[in-house]
Image (cartoon, rainbow, N blue to C red):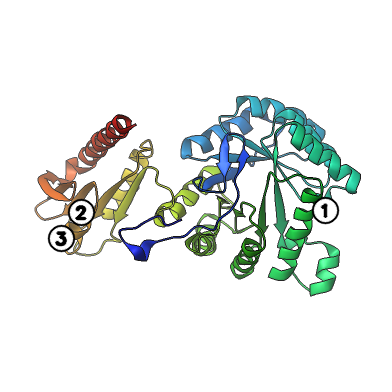
Amino acid sequence: MSLNHVRPWRDIYRRKSRQIMVGNVPVGGDAPIAVQTMTNTLTTDVAATVAQVQAAAEAGADIVRVSVPDEASSKALKEIVRESPLPIVADIHFHYRRGIEAAEAGAACLRINPGNIGDEARVKEVIKAARDHNCSIRIGVNAGSLEKHLLEKYGEPCPEAMVESGLEHIRILQDNDFHEFKISVKASDVFLSAAAYQGIAEATDAPIHLGITEAGGLVSGTIKSAIGLGNLLWMGIGDTIRVSLSADPVEEVKVGFEILKSLGLRHRGVNIISCPSCARQGFDVIKTVETLERRLEHIKTPMSLSIIGCVVNGPGEALMTDVGFTGGGAGSGMVYLAGKASHKMSNEQMIDHIVEQVERKAAELDAAAEAAE
């Protein structure tokens, strides 16, 4: 599917995949690429976990994953699901009973490796529970936990081993006539992840969950994820993403959306275009952008804002944005609306004024969208 017919050099043709449902969120097909994160609270602490889910939802997450390591967590999951504004994916490892309990508790999806939760009879029980409770499954292949026979065959984690692992797990589900699944083939190495995802994308029409696992802290993990996921998304691969960061889950959601926004695959909130600043700047660009990012977090309407320190690139960038501000001289700059110079504003009043202009434009866009429905 082409996402842009006016500028062909921006076309992205998404891989054709079948669509499944994770709760009320469609994944795959022509559905928007869903953004996920994962809670890092103790699942048994229902209040803290629900608070994280709600914060993720406010940041724009579509789906949230919750770890279910023991029976107490299974019991807590039922209450978490009941209070959650988003579909909950239950993260299951090794214990097949946890998978059954999670499906019974109302999880929208089970994240499992069918091959590590027991013998065929136990796998069938989990699949039956998923089917009975309208619960989809994510097959989660990870380079750090590949099956022993594949490591012996290939000598080390490699794209071929990860794809083979994924296809083995797919066969287990398909042999049990279960098709509501998506798949991921994650590694912490960007090259390994990218190659594995390209391989699995060619081998199956299942929806693909993208991620660079154990990517690192906020800065390093963001860069690795942007490179790895960005290139795959640009190739049209990926139906849902999770940016794995050693950071607040809300930061994962923000980074995920920024990756999608940069490729024109999702649009949410204000896209701020700003210069890095230099000696020509007519105001403190860095401090201004930091403040505006915080002040405009509540805006969900897709729109653009340019904040440029001087007139070298400022007017040109403003031509392409809904609202713009370009630094000038004598303590003031020019405000641009819909790409055209509108009026001057002092640097001292500039932030409040820009927030007001963005809020006004967002209201106009929302009203127009409602009228068009």
Most extreme residue toward the bottom, as rendered? Answer: 155
What residue type is disc 2 on? Ala
| Marks 2,1: beta carbons within 8 A | no
Residue 324 percent location from the top left of the image: 21, 49
Q: Residue at x 71, y 27 (%)?
A: 78
Marks 3/2: CA distance? 10 Å
Residue 211 at least partly seen: yes
Does residue 158 sit above or below 132 in this rendering? below
Tell me, for residue 115, which label it has, or none. 1
Mark 2 crowd level (few <14, some 14–19, many ≥20, 10 Å Cα) = many
Q: CA distance from mark 2 to mark 1?
A: 54 Å
Q: Which residue is mark 3?
A: 311
As displayed, is residue 1 above or below residue 132? below
Give the amino acid at mark 1.
Gly
The residue located at (59%, 46%) in the rendering is 19
Q: Quadrant of residue 124?
A: top right
Residue under pointer 2: 318
**First reached walking from the N terminus: tag 2 or tag 1:** 1
Q: Residues within 10 Å of mark 3 (few under 14, many from 20)?
A: some
Q: Find residue 312 and report its horizontal and vertical position in percent.
A: 17, 64
Looking at the image, tell me whether mark 3 or mark 2 is earlier in sequence order. Answer: 3
Q: Quadrant of the C terminus?
A: top left
Q: Amino acid at mark 3?
A: Val
Marks 1 and 3, the one that precedes in the sequence: 1
Q: Is residue 98 visible?
A: no
Residue 21 in picture, x, y percent from top left: 61, 39
| Position above or below: 230 against 175 | below
Q: Secondary structure at mark 1?
A: helix
Residue 326's quadrant in the figure?
bottom left
